[in-house]
């Protein structure tokens, strides 16, 4: 018997030139936009110029906030919101990888609720937000189709979900914007997308419907891995990995992520590992503790692989990072994940502290 819930209200525009083709979408959302980007890439990959042109066509004014760093902090979000409020912007356009798109979502919440601050936003109440349009320039996070905004909290010394539901009104995916991604960022972000597919597929909240998207994404990843390993990065690859990353976003919008993401946040916050690598470095040992081998076998089959050790050899080509980490640090991170109820709940099997410690040790020491 089929049984599931599905909610993903974002309009998706996928393909070359889509931003320029849709002034109507921008005009339907507001009259003055706060454009949120990282420091450089949006200006170099054509996405920012396309947005300026389409806003001009639609008669929409805009203000630019281009100071979003990787793993955006709540301080940056407050600064962006202050500019939006001062300029009376009525919607936000996030252009970039996950960092600017997530920052745009959080800023949209802060603009709508000027009374909140980085201290009070996590108090549990659901807050409204002004509309967001997301324009992806990496193929990794799927943030353009998820309700999540992952922020860095210096008080909590970690990255965490803002806890507000902010689905973009519209998502634009034009893989030409990703042509300028350096190989290393292409790998890091692709691995993030892959971990979304895996964590969404092996998830308490997985349904026949979310599995449909996850399986299609995993099937595409079989070829993506071959191309990443052989560095055959051409427009066809860029398009396929962007599509797979979007599918992965649609999956985790329903299921959430689980242990590798929860465990990886500490490795990004404390050790500076890029987000995708922080999850990816734990992935093989995570799959090793998974008891339901039938779903793992299906996952490998979709990837066109015979065994977990074949996947391990793909990962060992793509992830070569080494970090210095002590046993005490592993214990501290393991305690944090064991008390992260949301991530533990999403993992469909019972997991022990020893297993978590084991995943960190075997992956990192
Ligand atoms: P990112 O942090 O947004 O960007 C990484 C780097 O890539 C930056 O230096 C950026 O430069 C550059 N870059 C972006 N697009 C480029 C392009 N087209 N060409 C050349 N360089 C480009 O990376 P990300 O991996 O996409 O996002 C990671 C963040 O997303 C993390 O905070 C993670 O926790 C979060 N995340 C969110 C979700 C979600 O559902 N919301 C899911 C997974 C992860 P500039 O700074 O100059 O732009
Ligand atoms: Fe992620």
Image (cartoon, grey):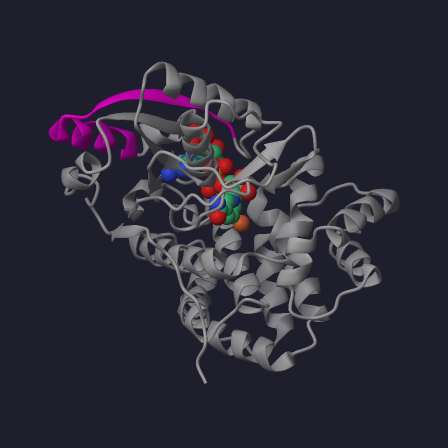
Q: Quadrant of the N terminus?
A: bottom left
Which image quadrant is residue 138 in? top left
Does the stretch in magenta take in 175?
no
Give the residue drawn at x 14%, y 40%: 24
- Residue 57 forms part of the magenta stretch: yes
Residue sitting at 19 percent across and 26 percent down? 60
Q: Is residue 208 above or below residue 183?
A: below
Image-based side of 123 in relation to 180, left or right: right
Residue depicted at x 74% and y 69%: 350
Give coordinates of residue 14: x percent, y percent: 26, 52
- Please give the name of the residue rendered at 56% of the width and 24% of the height, measured from the top-left corner: 117
Name the outermost residue toward the top: 86
In the rendered image, is residue 184 in sight?
Answer: no
**Where on the picture, by quarter, is residue 208?**
bottom left
Q: Is 103 situated left or right of 334 in this image?
A: left
Q: Is residue 256 above or below residue 129?
A: below
**Which residues are the magenta region?**
46-69
The answer to whether residue 47 of the structure is visible from this angle is yes
């Amino acid at each position: 018997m089929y049984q599931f819930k599905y909610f993903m209200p974002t309009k998706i525009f996928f393909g070359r030139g889509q931003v320029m083709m849709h002034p109507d979408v921008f005009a339907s959302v507001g009259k003055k936009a706060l454009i949120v980007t990282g420091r450089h890439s949006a200006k170099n990959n054509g996405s920012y110029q396309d947005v300026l042109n389409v806003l001009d066509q639609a008669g929409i004014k805009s203000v630019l906030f281009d100071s979003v760093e990787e793993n955006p902090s709540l301080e940056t979000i407050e600064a962006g919101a202050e500019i939006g409020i001062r300029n009376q912007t009525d919607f936000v356009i996030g252009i970039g990888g996950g960092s600017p798109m997530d920052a745009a979502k959080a800023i949209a919440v802060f603009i709508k609720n000027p009374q909140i601050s980085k201290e009070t936003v996590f108090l549990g109440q659901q807050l409204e937000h002004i509309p967001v349009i997301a324009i992806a320039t990496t193929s990794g996070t799927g943030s353009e189709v998820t309700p999540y905004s992952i922020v860095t909290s210096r008080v909590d010394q970690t990255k965490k979900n803002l806890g507000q539901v902010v689905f973009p009104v519209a998502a634009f995916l034009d893989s030409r914007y990703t042509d300028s991604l350096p190989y290393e960022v292409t790998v890091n972000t692709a691995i993030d997308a892959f971990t979304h597919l895996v964590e969404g597929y092996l998830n308490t909240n997985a349904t026949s419907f979310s599995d449909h998207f996850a399986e299609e994404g995993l099937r595409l990843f079989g070829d993506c891995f071959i191309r990443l390993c052989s560095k055959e990065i051409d427009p066809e690859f860029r398009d396929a990995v962007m599509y797979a990353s979007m599918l992965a976003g649609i999956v985790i919008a329903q299921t959430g992520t689980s242990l590798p993401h929860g465990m990886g946040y500490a490795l990004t916050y404390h050790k500076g590992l890029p987000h995708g690598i922080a999850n990816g470095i734990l992935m093989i040992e995570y799959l090793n503790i998974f008891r339901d081998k039938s779903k793992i076998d299906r996952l490998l089959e979709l990837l066109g692989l015979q065994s977990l050790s074949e996947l391990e050899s793909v990962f060992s080509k793509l992830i070569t990072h080494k970090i210095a980490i002590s046993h005490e640090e592993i214990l501290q991170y393991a305690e944090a994940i064991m008390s992260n109820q949301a991530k533990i709940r999403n993992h469909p099997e019972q997991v022990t502290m020893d297993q978590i410690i084991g995943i960190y040790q075997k992956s990192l020491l």
